[in-house]
Amino acid sequence: MTTLTSGGLTSGVSAPPGGLRRIGSARWRRRNLTFDKITFFLVFLVIPVAFYIAFVVSPFVQAAYFSLTDWTGFSPGMNFIGLSNYAKLFADSTFLQAMGNNILMAIVVPVVTLGVAMFFATLVTVGGSTRGNVKGLRSSSFYRVVSFFPYVIPAIVIGLIWSQIYDPSAGLLNGILTRLGLEQFASFAWLGDPRTARWAVMFVIIWGLVGFYMVLFIAAIKGIPAEVFEAARIDGAGRFRTAISITIPLIRENVQTAFIYIGILALDAFVYMAALEPGGGPDNTTLVMAQQLFTTAFTKGQFGYACAMGVVLAVITLAYAGLVFAVNRFFGGKSEVGE
Amino acid sequence: MTQISQGAAPVAPAGERVPFEPAESGEAPGTAGDKAVTGFSHTVLIIWSFLVIIPLIWVLMSSFKTSSEIFASPFALPERWSFDNYVNAWTTAGIGSFFLNSVIVVVGALILTMFFGSMSAYVLARFSFPGSRALYYLMLAGLTFPIFLAIVPLFFVLRGIGLLNTLPGLILTYAAFAFPFTVFFLYAFFRSLSKSIAEAAAVDGAGEWRTFFQIMLPMAKPGLATVAILNFVGLWNQFLLPIALNTNPDNYVLTQAMASFASQAGYSVDFGALFAAVVITVVPVLIIYLIFQRQLQGSVSAGVSK
Amino acid sequence: MDINVKPLGRRDFLRGSLAAAALAATGTLGACATSGTGTSTQTSSAPAGQVSDTNPFGVQSGTAVEAVIFKGGYGIDYAEFAGKQVEAKQQGVTVKVTPTTKVAQTLQPRFVAGNPPDVIDNSGAGLIGVNTIRDQLAELNDVVEAKNYEGTVIKDTLYEGVMDPGTFDGKFIVLNYVLSVFAIWYSASLFEQNGWTVPKTYEEMLALGEEAKGKGKYLLGWGKEAATYYQTMAIGSAIKEGGDEVRLALDNLKPGCWSLPPLQDVFNGLKKIIDAGYMKPGGSGTVFTAAQAQWSEAEDFILYPSGSWIENEMKDQTKSGFKMTGAPEPVVSSNSKMPWEALHSTAGEGYIVPSQGKNVAGGKEFLRAMLSQEAAVNFAKTKLASTIVKGTVPADGFGSTALQSQIKMLETAGSNIFSWTVLNPADLYGMNTDQLVVWNTFLGGGSSVAELTEGLQKITDKVANDDSIKKVQVS
């Protein structure tokens, strides 16, 4: 079933040519409503979705309603106050700062993580000889397995580990730096200096995630028929060009899903921060919305206000996903859902 | 013209394509440029591997040290290799029984969510009907809202059906919260399965039920395995949900016991025991991963592709 | 919308819209759904039993008391001890003690549902802001007016003023069980060895810093989560200097309260110490317990401002022969309104009895047990910290120098004991998180006194100007 001519490649494909065959085109037609179909839909869609709505969506919808109230979170009563929580929110400089931090993270973390992951995946898969078949590196499975380790460790534990490593006096990092003769780092507070804190925490998140996406991309690249690479080589494409103009377009959909999922994580980042910077970091440079939301809800007892923050967070996350879809489509990807 | 069948990538039956398999060993003597690239690749990846491994080894080493030793020097080996910290963590946190609870809850929720998730993802990917796009976004939305804002309403749902503070209640909740993730990833996967196979099945007279269970599901096995492993990791580490919904100490899951222990170890400044607790939590997941990693290597792309 | 005007109102609503859907889903699957209608609607407290001197709140036989205890530095064994006492004294009453590490999250839904436990130790990082639930708490005056298990009226057995931090707008609703003294702590042996004396003013502190530097040590240090311990010290010093005027301005969130001269003097004193390099750098990136170990174990710095829980907190991380000792917070000048010996002391570990609990009388009985001599002595002995019950610590402080000095400081201070309400440690409006940021910057040398003042004022003003936050009027 796979037919692939080198013609498509020599023309410098930036996107897979049309005619992709997918299954998502079956049209719902009323006259097809058989007993089989009805029960099928009922069991396959209606019940799971009802379950999902009852346990996940409806609590969230209620929380969204709370955002229009002055609920403390503990009282039985609450008053409807319209949009004033939202008005307060956009005048709250701390929250806006947290939003800015989150947005910076949602840009840096996905780009760096996925960039590094893609780079490593490329090294592992096509770093081998150019003679004969396209080859990967020796002991690539070792790199794969090792890189994946951090993903298995709970985020809270990753945070704990790194807060120890970053410890100014007894931490591993400064220990190494001072042994290398860099005495100025003797008591340097990586997590406590406004110049370094946000990069230090982003590094931890990236450290934790690169391996997962690397494994993802390796598997995806391995799914590309070898002839594609052979053909590219015959055409004289170098490694770099091959990666840019062949590999990435061919695994475009993986990259999109990866971008969305990691973006959701970067916009949340609560667990990492709870361990690394529970207080929001120096000058609040690492404060994220979820943290602000948490203290507002539980310590300050302004649950309605916290729910408004939650709604804003959800909207930003959805907007981010929409942006990723749009960018992908702009560069020639297919639409993300339906037809 | 050119056709790159995306379906071919993850799951096409063997023989229909020449899979691109990176050779694991025996690199042919290449050009000088090759050697440079290979050398460079190894260098970069070895540095990265060190970056990953050193902190983990450091944690392992620290878990054998007393707190004073940890403060005294980050590098020094423990004076004596004793399992005191482990014994302390194991007994104080009562890990044994909570371990079983965790297994029950996670496995139960996993089965449920994989079952529901694969069905819904299949329907969403296979059929286009009014509202399918909205449903997809609804799944996405479920991934974006902070869980702890939903705790109070969720509490009432569970109390309403009499499952508060019970393991079945926790299983249902876990399953529901893993559902959007499952659908989100499996959706992409089912879309990559060839339409022609489903059509062929229909021509053969197979109904939707049979098509799904006898044809699509077996084909989706690698993807299901991938998502199942990811879900396992996620659910095993879940700890926001049980805090308020599972307050009966008999029904505690491992993460709750660990959080409780870590909190106490933090107050009494027992970092050695804290590191030991970390090792105890991570090791089961690590073992599961090492056992199933071949599965994962072979299929992770399938789960998330296209 | 009112969740619980009628006990069933909210539940009906939920059952109608959500639980039904959940039931449908689970029921169809034949899963474990049992009954959607069987939940009890009990709201009233257990009927009161016979009231007597030995059963002052009328706990009824056959009832259960549910206690949810924060499991932190003190553990929960002391609460279990009290639970056993209740069971022994009140026939047929059972006590269930449940530990939690995140009080607010664990109990939030139960407060909303009108089904909270009978008594709660509302402490730790995850405590419920008292301001949020104060309408839902039972007044505890009858507890302190009752006779204890030894037959004395409880009120007469308590230290002076310990009810104040639990009293809001005239209502005593939080029983703070553990007495805390705020002081600067040091190693008596180290000081003796070097011939150092405890500094009584910020000038003397600066001088001591120079001497410590000569020995390769820093004067002070801090950890990122505990940077506001310096705020606590600063306010303590300023109140000694300026008296009630300072306290009331801060407690009532007055505009410009942080610019009062006594506070400014303290800030300037601290700033000199920071600028001289006597503060161990890196605190803003150090976990507070690790920072404290740098003081008690490694002796990298020699003075640490903290509450008296510090000894118990660091007991496994204290150098042998350290002789931890406390001294009152320094004053600014020689003509301060209160003497140097005046002591900032307050009670912590807040116990509350929700008024909606099933067994309010049982919850109060539990507190009565905790305030018995036996339980209080047990606590002091095992935790090396004093409860609010007087005379439970012998002169030798159970062999603890810190406990000894704590009792001595209290005696020397006499009636010069003060505290305040809204800022640390009570943190009524939850401002600590924001203040930490400002203090971490200041202690690290990253901001001037003016910037510190402005930052703190901004946080205070934000709360003061937010009408949705209910304020407590302090006088």
Image (tube, coloured by chain):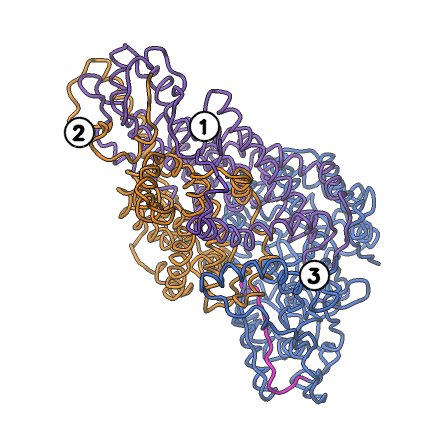
Q: Can residue B169 be seen in this view?
A: yes
Which residue has dot 3 on it? Answer: C345
Please give the name of the residue rendered at 73% of the width and 76% of the height, measured from the top-left corner.
C144
Crowdedness of circle 3 by 10 Å Cα count: few (<14), some, many (20+)?
many
Chain letter for the purple colouring in the rendering: A
Comparing labels 2 and 3, the label whose residue is closer to the camera: 2
Q: Mark 2 points at which residue?
A: B25
Three-letter amino acid code of the residue under disc 2 = Ser
Q: How far apart are marks 1 and 3 (CA)?
A: 51 Å
Instruction: Supply the letter of whichever chain is orange.
Output: B
Chain letter of disc 3 in the image:
C
Image height check: is A182 above or below C100?
A: above
Left or right of C120 in this view: B101: left
Looking at the figure, which quarter contains the N terminus of chain B?
top left
Q: In this view, does C220 lie to the left or right of B85?
A: right
Give the chain letter for blue. C
The image position of residue C151, as x and y in percent, is 69, 86
The residue at the point 73 percent across, 73 percent down is C140
Disc 1 residue type (three-letter): Val
Q: In this view, does B190 lie above or below C92?
A: above
Res. A112 mark: 1
In the rendered image, residues at marks 2 and 1 fall on the same chain? no
User: Going by the image, does B172 lie left or right of C70?
Assistant: left
Q: Which of A59 and C97 is in front in this view?
A: A59
Q: Are marks 1 and 3 on the same chain?
A: no
* Residue B271 vs residue A13, the one in the foreground: A13
Q: Where does the magenta region start and end?
A: C59-74
